[in-house]
Amino acid sequence: MAISSIFNDVLGPVMRGPSSSHSAAACRIGLLLRQLMHEQITAIVIDYDPNGSLVTTHESQGTDMGLYGGLLGWEADDEQMPHYRSALEKAGIETIVNYIDYGATHPNFYRISVSNSFITHTLSAISTGGGMMEVLNIDGAEVSIFGDKYVVLIYGENLGLLQSMLPDWAQGNLRLTTSFIEISTLIEFKKEEIAELESLPGVSNVCQLKPVVPVLEGKTSDLPFRYCSQMLELGNSEKLELWELGLLYESKRGNISQKKAWSKMENISKIMKEGIKKGMRGTHYEDRILPVQSIKYKLKDESGQLLNGGMLNKMIMYTTAMMEVKSAMEVFVAAPTAGSCGVLPGTLFGAAEALDSDPDTIVKALFSAGIIGVFIAEHATFSAEVAGCQAETGAGGSMAAAALVTLIGGSLKQSVTAASFALQNSLGIICDPIGNRVEAPCLGKNVMAASNALSCANMALSDYEALIPFDEVVMTMKEVGDAMTHELKCTGLGGLAATPAAKAIEKKLKEKAKFC
């Protein structure tokens, strides 16, 4: 498994689309497939297993948009994303989607065949939550590719003989499979090196797969900690705050300077802030259920027609604005997912405005949120298809609670206590999007998570005892997710999604799509 990263897994990707598990992860799979095909694609065949989640959600939750966008060479935040259908037609790419029971081992399982007039490649992959993915099989050979390093696949007739002829520079990090020789590295291959491989006798094809995530593969040996308990021990002994521990972890994890990690987080902060501003100006997108509501909330609040919520009202307003930006196909940060993208920025920037916090303090709070998210990504999941919405808005609320404590200058213990409280309070939340759109009840769950984060931060700042250590809460969340039925994990088959009213909305959306 890849080692979790704040920028790869938790605060990112920067994207467009309704769902990070669907849109962003699929885009990254598509980008790798495009490289596998040397950017020459004429036909795509995709098989989805009815036992997973993608049969019922691949159209409505942005899997098609992300996958085809990646195959067209677009990044997850490309403004062309909503226009993928016309771009496919213009490119002359034929697409076929099959629903086949083939015993998929994961709810977000992709089995894809891509071809042109010269060659065909097959690939199997899974979306693991929050935009992350893993390629499991290429052309019949088992692999484990996360898009976080440079990989070269060398095809030929006699692979054993071919291996013996490889130059010295290609001998490290080499793996012989039944279909190709795989070489991986953290340094980009030079053009002359690829040309040297292509010129070897018996080589039929050389494919280079470049990274598709922000931070390259890290080494377990370089990490200062893997569990929250270990982090607390280090923080207490070295007298480090939570944000400092997050910055330290990401610097070691990605083998980058703390200055570079800080700069990356500043950019994340700017994107979040701009997203809220854009949301508060009003957004529009034809294919969505909910109208603009953040502006109405603001007007009601300013005219004194709401209960006096102060900071909380601002958080609710900004959380709503961020969700509306997501639903309008504008750029946002999955934090940790698209379905929960309103919680952290809405909570943090709502509080920061009320407290008049400076930009550096906001960045520190984001590092605190990020490291809390790392423990969830590393030891559980952000995927609603795996563990329900507790893994999305529950995780987002836990991260936001820690961020709020950092924002006001609370201690390391108080930050982790707030995160533990918030996740404890979220156990068992199901994922049941109405009309297969990531809007409702998703918005309400984002708002609930923001409210929960504020309450839990204040409880922790008042030195309430969480009782259950954060590591144990994370493991419990995973166990609760495993106990949930398939229908309650983002399939559109249970919960509110299965009500007559929701089915009527779904039908109306499908009929509307026929005329668009």
Image (spheres, rainbow, N blue to C red):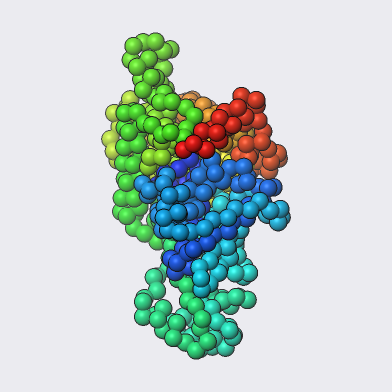
Is residue 498 in sight in this rendering?
A: yes
Residue 472 position by quadrant: top right
Q: Residue at x 69, y 47 (%)?
A: 51
Which residue appears at 32% of the width and 55% of the height?
260
Residue 90 in the image: above or below residue 152: above
Residue 234 x %, y %: 47, 50
Q: Is residue 24 left or right of residue 100?
A: left
For this orientation, the residue located farthest to the front is: 515
Nearer the observer, 77 or 224: 77
How far across and how far down the image is residue 456, in percent? 50, 28
Left/right placement of residue 168 relative to residue 432 reads: left
Quadrant, the N terminus: bottom right
Q: Position of residue 265 (x, y in %)?
A: 35, 47
**Number of numbered markers:** 0
Q: Identify the residue at horizontal 61%, vertical 58% (top origin).
A: 111
When the figure is inspected, residue 36 is found, relative to residue 84, above or below; the finding is: below
The answer to whether any part of residue 404 appears in the image is no
Residue located at (48% from left, 68% from top): 37
Q: Horizontal and vertical percent for residue 360?
A: 30, 40
Q: Quadrant of residue 140?
A: bottom right
Q: Is residue 122 above or below residue 349?
A: below
Q: Looking at this view, is 198 or 311 the one in front?
A: 198
